[in-house]
Image (cartoon, helix red, strand yellow):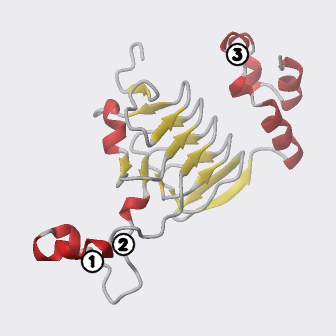
């Protein structure tokens, strides 16, 4: 981004077919924001996908832990002996095909604070905010604010009725020129103002 070397739009950088990122979603990192795919999406061996919607803001150090991080928990030890190779590699079946929680899906217009961690299979709803340092282990409702370890719902940003209206409006799907024309309303107007601005 111009004059912001620590901020990158993610969509043009993603090469993995297991990651999908919507338009205008960005990541901020002073070290190497272009390495998001390898430094911030961990244990991603598939087939589960990471899907991030449009207009998401990911603060420095946001990490997505994927299903490949799972270990067996049904026996006396959780240690993954077969991945160490040697004679233990003959038992690879013990660490493959472990149950997963499915795709990790982030909605549109989601803000992740500094150093948040998202666990496998979590779904984060549109318009949600995840507080800095949170560990998200369960789904986050649309327009919910969560924080802590494990992250808990702190409050909803809007009433249920207004959340339903916002989801129906889906401003993130408006044509870019229309978004530009109504930027003030999108950023600081009321839900009624947004309804009036809808194309």
Q: Secondary structure at mark 3?
A: loop
- Disc 1 secondary structure class: loop
Which quadrant of the figure has residue 87? bottom left
Q: Is residue 88 above or below residue 83?
A: below
Within-10-Å neighbours for mark 3: few <14, some 14–19, many 20+: few
State the SS at label 2: loop
Q: Quadrant of the N terminus?
A: top left
Residue 79's disc is: 1
**Image spot of residue 164 (x, y percent):** 84, 42
Viewer-nearest residue: 24 or 80:
80
- Camera-nearest residue between 18 and 166: 18
Query: Residue 57 location, x and y as percent?
Result: 53, 34
Q: Which residue is mark 2?
A: 71
Q: Is residue 151 left or right of residue 41?
A: right
Q: Is residue 187 visible?
A: no
The residue to which callout 3 is attached is 175
Left or right for 132, reference 38: right
The residue shown at (43%, 56%) is 66
Q: Earlier in the sequence, mark 3 or mark 1?
A: 1
């Amino acid at each position: 981004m111009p004059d912001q070397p620590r901020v990158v739009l993610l969509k043009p950088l993603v090469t993995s077919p297991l990651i999908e990122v919507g338009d205008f979603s960005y990541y901020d990192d002073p070290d190497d924001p272009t390495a998001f795919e390898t430094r911030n999406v961990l244990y991603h061996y598939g087939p589960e996908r990471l899907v991030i919607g449009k207009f998401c803001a990911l603060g420095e150090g946001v990490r997505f832990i994927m299903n490949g991080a799972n270990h067996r928990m049904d026996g006396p030890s959780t240690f993954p002996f077969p991945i160490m190779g040697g004679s233990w590699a003959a038992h690879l079946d013990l660490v493959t095909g472990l149950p997963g929680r499915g795709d990790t899906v982030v909605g549109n217009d989601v803000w992740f604070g500094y150093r948040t961690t998202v666990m496998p299979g979590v779904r984060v709803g549109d318009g949600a905010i995840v507080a800095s340092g949170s560990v998200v282990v369960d789904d986050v409702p649309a327009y919910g604010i969560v924080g802590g370890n494990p992250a808990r719902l702190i409050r909803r940003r809007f009433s249920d009725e207004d959340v339903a209206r916002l989801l129906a409006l889906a401003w993130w799907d408006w044509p870019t020129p229309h978004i530009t024309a109504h930027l003030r309303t999108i950023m600081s107007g009321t839900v009624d103002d947004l309804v009036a601005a809808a194309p």
